[in-house]
Amino acid sequence: MKPPIHSASSLSKLGQRATEPPISWLMKMAIDRPQLISLAAGFTDSDSLPVDEARALMNEMLGSANSGRAALQYGSTSGDADLIRLTIERLLALEGAKAASQRAYDPQRVVITHGSQQFLYLISEALCDPGDIVLVEDPTYFVFLGILQIHGVRTRGVPVTPDGMDLTALEKVLESLRRRGELPKLKLLYLVSYFQNPSGVTTALEKKEAALKLLRRYERDAGHPIYLLEDAAYRELRFSGPEIPSALSLPNASSRVIYTGTYSKPFATGVRVGFGLLPETLLRVVYRIKGNHDFGTSNLLQRLLAMAMATGRYEKHLPLLRRRYASKAAAMIEALKQHFPSSVQWLAPEGGMYIWAQLPKAIQTGPKSKFFRRVFARDVFYVPGEFCYAEDPARSKPRHEMRLSFGSASESNIREGIARMGAVLKELT
Amino acid sequence: MKPPIHSASSLSKLGQRATEPPISWLMKMAIDRPQLISLAAGFTDSDSLPVDEARALMNEMLGSANSGRAALQYGSTSGDADLIRLTIERLLALEGAKAASQRAYDPQRVVITHGSQQFLYLISEALCDPGDIVLVEDPTYFVFLGILQIHGVRTRGVPVTPDGMDLTALEKVLESLRRRGELPKLKLLYLVSYFQNPSGVTTALEKKEAALKLLRRYERDAGHPIYLLEDAAYRELRFSGPEIPSALSLPNASSRVIYTGTYSKPFATGVRVGFGLLPETLLRVVYRIKGNHDFGTSNLLQRLLAMAMATGRYEKHLPLLRRRYASKAAAMIEALKQHFPSSVQWLAPEGGMYIWAQLPKAIQTGPKSKFFRRVFARDVFYVPGEFCYAEDPARSKPRHEMRLSFGSASESNIREGIARMGAVLKELT
């Protein structure tokens, strides 16, 4: 007798590694509970979505047979040429005078993707085998951790300080990998550089430069390039402080920096269009893999964004968005000051959608913790901080932190949510 | 001294396997040669793209803040609930009375993807490790071969006859795998069942049923399910003959049949939305992987299609499309009869966009062949048939065939292109 036939047994190794991502759990928790105040969601502000702008653009685009047909037909795998050109122009405008190496901003280095998430997936596929190592920030963007996890990639965390990654800690991790002969497995350092998801921290340019130099120093022992992957998803959502150039502006960027950005956050999350810039050898490989994923992102979405940018509507919409987030951030900060005990630490971000709160170590925040359950019982919801930490055998995960989003909740709900959380905190301290 | 650092050396195994896909070569060949008559492209008919319909739908959708915001915000990973419901309704209408197992058509079994290509990628990731085996038709859809190739999957080809796969050949392949102890590596049989890309062949329902039974018989030796993956990408483009139910209508379908369809071809290729139905254990895994790819297909595209279907505009547009393709197919067939020598064999399809031509064996059609070069010199372009054959150690690839598309070229260009090819054929025979 042969054993019974189970469906699970024909899964690939990747399929077997694919565990329920925290994001699904978060979404499920929120369903059927409309009264819930969600400070967890990565959803953007709904009131400021560019509905009228999108309608006007669609009418223009679909108003003539020629441009309409172009939008409704297949495009190329790399992406729409106009959108690529406008992406580079926009990027150069953000970089300012610091854009040292023109080569790094060559339109030929761009691929347009179905959200920057798809780009993160493609580059991980291109570089990482099971057992390989990727360095991430402690804490970091948890859906990127999901990509690494299903590919069997090992992770090491590098603590974040208020101006970016702790460089001494980065050097220590690199040194420990060198000593253990594991550098040949190290593929890249992942950096969410602007108003980081989840910590809100922005990385100083000097830190990007120092990190890039450090990685370079260890390449000889690695035997191959160690890339810096800069994820600038929130860059356009700055509401205070001066603009900071990306790592693309640094020397040697064109051969070692991989940069990704998105139009989903600054324009509309329902329009999933992101982009990546990357060294040529990798670009070719990413094109080929994307050719197998979907042979090109929806042309309709790409043409919509190209037109939004070309007509100035994109640029005109941004200040509105920034004012909204500035105001929501201020509401959350005001409420935190009013309702949270002084033992809770948090940092005011200069943009983005997140504030990271560190509770006293005795108060755990995980999905089974007393704090989480009491907060949830009062219809308030956040992302437990431990979801944002990589699996790293060299340290245990902090369990007393949380990500608070001011992206989608209304200002009054933000205030109410923080007040209810504050009440629970007072019960527990 | 350490060896010099090459970028290529940090690529993953998948990255290293990612070779230039034929589709990129095809696209490159066509660029900068606007006078080219392309009978190669998989592009759809441009004149019948629903420009006015899309504009009207966008105005409706983006005409109110509520529905506009819903379209411009993130959705769920599995897809828009309305689109899923309408997809099932549409599918049941196509299946007719044969829809035996209601369970196979449960909306809970659906995932919406960024084109059906993404679904093919996801299911391959979920099931296949390097060294695994997938059975495909001889010939088959070459971009699916690309997916298998970058995942290191081995392939075995099963010849296609005018009503679908040769079942005797299928049994022989299964038997040879059994004898060699390779059945535990066999994961699925891939079938492009309607007006197949590239052969134009439609698979009879009896053949689907027999294939499913055959696979079932070998599962005991495999030790796990062997799935039938039915790709119905062209199903809605039928212009003659009676509708044929899918394999979902067969007994045991809900546990063994994976079905995928698309709205890109019957509505607009610039709107990349496809879908898959699959057994629950696989569905969970595919959701999780898709959560890492993009956590959900663009909501704007999904809402557009849901509205096109709900308002009846989708259904109303189809007859126009079918008349266009019927007329283009007729033009190509007429030209083939007039200009090709009788030694060339081809089959009139009942739908889709392709005719498969078998030249006399002495005339090779590959990209370096005399025939290809002479045809290309006269500004005509086709897909060499060998691109559509899997790597299979058990047989050599036929080299004397070609895929002719009547999808995007105008009728006069179709006639002219075939006439020029015919002239070259006469020179060579």
Image (cartoon, coloured by chain):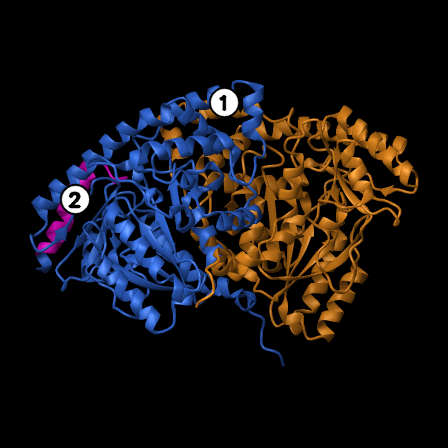
Chain colours: A orange, B blue
From the viewer's perspective, tell me whether residue A148 is left or right of residue B381. Answer: right
Looking at the image, which is closer to me, B365 or B96?
B96
Please identify the quarter of the rendering in which residue A151 is found. Answer: bottom right
Q: Which residue is mark 1?
A: B61
Query: What chain letter is assigned to the residue under label 1?
Result: B
Q: Residue furthest front?
A: A1
| 3D distance between C-alphas at marks 1 and 2 | 41 Å
Query: What chain letter is assigned to the residue under label 2?
Result: B
Amino acid type assigned to the residue bearing label 1 in the image: Met
Residue at left 23%, top 46%? B204
Q: Which stretch appears magenta? A: B407-426
On screen, residue A333 above or below B377: above
On screen, residue A367 above or below B400: above
Q: Which residue is mark 2?
A: B348
Q: Position of residue B177 (x, y in %)?
A: 34, 69
Q: Are marks 1 and 2 in contact (CB under 8 Å)?
A: no
Label 1 neighbour load within 10 Å: few <14, some 14-19, many 20+: many
**Res. B173 in view:** yes
Was residue B261 drawn as part of the magenta stretch in this picture?
Answer: no
Looking at the image, which is closer to me, A45 or A78?
A45
